[in-house]
Image (cartoon, rainbow, N blue to C red):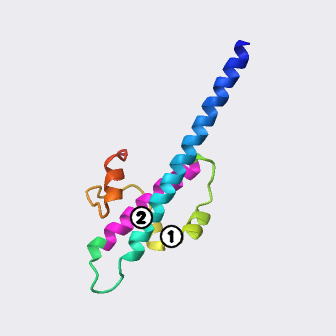
Amino acid sequence: MTLDLLRSAHATLDYEIAQERASAFGRLGRRLEAALAALAACPRTENSDRKIRDALVEQAGYALWLFVVQREACGLNKISQVLRDYGVPNEVYVRMGPLASPSIQPTKTVELEAASAPMF
């Protein structure tokens, strides 16, 4: 009987871990979509504010990095599929990684999430 209880507890824990992974994966996917949408809304013209666009590219690169790390934690390793499915511009892909300037926060959503982001 005790072994059955342990197996049941283990199965419950495995289920909760899978739920949390899926939830985090969904949140990070939405964050990536929002960052890419904000970047797409920023005009790429000579008159546009380059500092704002650079900050948006940096935020999108950070969101992409978080999403890719979560995918890899779930056993999904093909980044080419992510780049294609989400339409990630090359300028974002080459900036994928942790924020170089965490003080640059172009959007409220990113500001709240970046404030609680772990420091590496």
Q: Is the N terminus in the top left, top right, bottom left or bottom right quadrant?
A: top right
CB of mark 2 within 8 Å of CB of mark 1?
A: yes
Indicate the amino acid at tag 2.
Ala
Outermost residue to the bottom: 46
Q: Amino acid at mark 1?
A: Val
Q: Work out whether 100 lies above or below 74.
A: below
* Whether residue 64 is visible: no
Kindly report the secondary structure that dominates the magenta region of the rendered protein.
helix
Question: Magenta stretch: residue 68 in it?
Answer: yes
Q: Residue 120: percent from the left, percent from the top?
A: 37, 46
User: Element under label 1?
Assistant: loop
Q: CA distance from mark 2 to mark 1?
A: 9 Å
Q: Is residue 29 above or below residue 83?
A: above
Residue 37 or residue 53, whichever sits in front: 37
Total of numbered circles in the picture? Answer: 2
Residue at image location 39% in from the left, 70% down from the top? 38
Residue count near mark 1 (Cα–Cα under 10 Å), binned few <14, some 14–19, many ≥20 = some
Question: Element at badge 2?
Answer: helix
Q: Residue at x 63, y 36 (%)?
A: 15
| Residue 103 coordinates in the image, percent (x, y) | 25, 56
Rendered position, 117 above or below 39:
above
Position in image of residue 105 (x %, y %): 29, 60
Residue 54: give x, y in percent of width and height: 33, 70
Residue at numbered disc 1: 88
User: Which residue has dot 2 on it?
Assistant: 60
Residue in view at x 44 percent, y 68 percent: 36
Residues in magenta?
53-72
Position of 100 with respect to 20 (left or right) is: left
